[in-house]
Amino acid sequence: MQANPTWPNLASMMFALARQWPSRPMLRGWRDGGWHTIRWGEFGRMAASCARHLRQAGVAAGDRVLLCMENRPEFPLTETALMAIQAVPVPAYTTNTVDDHAHLLRDSGARTAVVSSAALADRLLAAAAKGNGLQLLIVTDGVPSVDAGAARVLSWADLIEDQRPPDDVAAEVAAIPPTALACLIYTSGTGGSPRGVMLPHRAILSNCAGAAELVRPLGLRDEVYLSYLPVSHAYEHTVGQFFMLSLGTEIVYARGVEHLAADMLAVRPTILTAVPRVLEVIRMRVLTQLARETPLRQRLFQTAAAIGLKRVDGERLTLSERLLDPLLDRLVRAKVRARFGGRLVAAMSGGARLDPEVGRFFQSLGMTIMQGYGQTEAGPVISANPPDAIRIDTVGKPLSGVDVRIAGDGEILVRGGLVMDGYWNRPRDTEATIRDGWLHTGDIGELDRGYLRITDRKKDMIVLSGGENVSPAKIEGMLMAETEIAQAVVTGEGRSGVSALVVPADGHDDVGVALAISRTNYRLSVTERVRKHAVVSPFTIDNGLLTPLQKIRRVLVMRANAHILGRLH
C-alpha cells in the first residue's frame, strides 16, 4: 500500500502521483460500448491542459465553478484542474431540479459550470435564467439544445488538447497552502435548503491520512474500486475519489445504479463503499431467494451463518464445525460473496446507520464490513471500524488526528484538521456549529472503550406525551432490516405512542408488513413499539423524499403524508 506522505494540497497530490506512476491504470469508464482506461501519466497531462485552458477562458482564483456530471473520469480531471488554478469546485447532483441548481448558483455565486450532457446543460441554463446567469458553460458530451444567452459554450475536449507535459502546472500548485479552500460541497440535507460547506485542502487530506492508517491491516495493493455513489456527495468525493487514488487504487466508474449488479460481476472490485440501503437490499434478495430453496439448502445456509457468527464473536468452534466449515464456505458463503464479484477485500459502510443485524449477516458470510461515521462538515469521515477489530454495533474509532468528546447533553463534538472552515456566506450558522474549535455534529452518541456509538440525531429525537424519549433512527433501521419492509419513517412527537409510515418491499403486502412490525415490536421496549402504521407510496429521488445518497428526508415524508398521519394519530 502507498505510504501517505504529506502533500500541501489535493492538486499537488494528484500531480505527484501522476509523476510517480505514469503507466499505472488510474480511471476506467464506460464509453461507446466498452471500458476505457486512463493512466496516471495521461491524467497529469490532461489535467494540466484543462487548467491552462480554464485560465485562458477567464476562470480565476477564487471563482466558484459548478460541476454537474455522473461518476466518470472527467470529474476528477476537471476538479484537479480547477484546484490547480485555485478556482473552487462546487459539485452538484445530476438529479437536481432546475430550482435546486438555481439555489446553488445563487448561493455560491458560480458563473461557470461544467456538465456532462446536453440535457444537463439545458437544465443549468434554465437555472441560470432564474438567477445571475452564466458566463461560461463547458459540456463534455453534446451541445445545449436551448439558447445559451450570454454564456460562452465550450467543448470539454478542447480543454484537454494541449500535449505539453504538466511540469509547469505541477510546479505552480506546490505553492497552494493546505488552508486554501479546496471545494464547496452543499449538504444534501434531509430537510431545509442545502448549505455550502467550505472544505479546505487540509480537511480532505486529513481524512486521507487517517483512513490510510485505518486500512493498513488490510495490506492493500493494486486494488480495484467500483464507484457508484454520487461523487458530488462528500462521502464518495473524499473516500471514493481522493482517498482511493492516494493509495494507487484503480477507480472504475459504474454505468449507473441500474447496472450495479452487472458491473460488480464484470469489474469484480476488491474495495467498495456502500450506503446501508444497498446492503439491506442485497440481504433482502438473498433471504427471499433462500425462502424458495429446499429445506436442506436452508439448513446449510443457517448452519454456515451460525458458524460464521461464532467466528465473528470469537467463540471456539467444535471439531465438527471446524471440519464442516470449509465445505460450507464453498457451498454457501462464496455464492453470496459472488454477488459482489467474488474478490471483495472489504466494504466500507457509511452515509447512514447500518443496522447491526444487517452487518452481522454479511460478517457471518465472511465479508469485512467496516461501518464508519461522518458528515460533510468534517471532511466527511470522523470514525470507522478498524478491519482487524470490528465492532459492528458501533461506527468505530475516531481516525488518527481526530478528537471526539461527548457533551453533557450527549451531543458528539469533533475537533481536528478535518473540520470545515464554515458555511458559505452563513456566519451565524458557522458560529452556532463550531464553538471553541469544536464541531457540534447534532448527533447523539456515546464512547465505549474508544469506539463511538451513534444513538440518534439531536433534533430528530421523538418525545412522547408521557415524556419518554424515543430514537426514530433505531426503530426505522430495525423495521427496514425486515425482508417485507423497504422503507420506514417513524413518528410520534407529543403523542402517546409511536406510529410508522411503511413502504412494503417488492412482492409483499400489508399483511407481510404487519407481521414484520410484530416481529420488530417483540425486540423493542414498550414505549418504542409501533402501535399504528400505514402503508404509503415509495420514497424516491424523483418525488423529493430521498436524497441522492438514498437517505430518507423524514421531515418531507411526514409533510407529504400529513393527511395519513392525521388519521393514525
Image (spheres, rainbow, N blue to C red):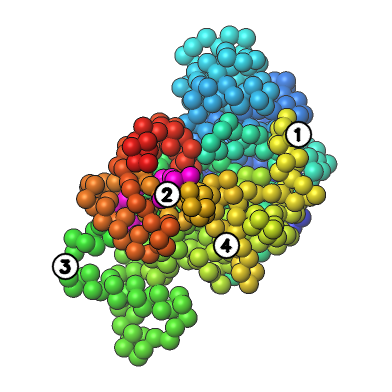
For residue 493: magenta? yes
How crowded pointer 4 is (Cα within 10 Å; few <14, some 14-19, many 20+) is rated as many
Q: Is residue 261 above or below residue 545?
A: below
Q: Which residue is depicted at the point 36% across and 78% down?
A: 307
Please give the label number shown on residue 496. Answer: 2
Q: How far apart are marks 1 and 3 (CA)?
A: 62 Å
Give the number of the disc on residue 453. Answer: 4
Q: Give the range drawn in magenta.
A: 481-497
Question: Which amino acid type is marked by label 2?
Answer: Ser
Q: Which amino acid does label 1 sit on?
A: Pro
* Residue 474 vs residue 347, the one in the foreground: 474
Residue occupied by mark 3? 294
Q: Within 10 Å of the Cα at label 1, are there few (<14), some (14-19), or many (20+) other Cα atoms?
A: few
Q: Which residue position holds label 1?
A: 427
Q: Which of marks 2 and 1 is in front?
A: 2
Quadrant of the drawing holding the N terminus = bottom right
Whole-angstrom CA distance, mark 1 to mark 4, is 30 Å
- Reply yes or no: does residue 509 show up in magenta: no
Describe the element under mark 3 as helix, strand or loop: loop
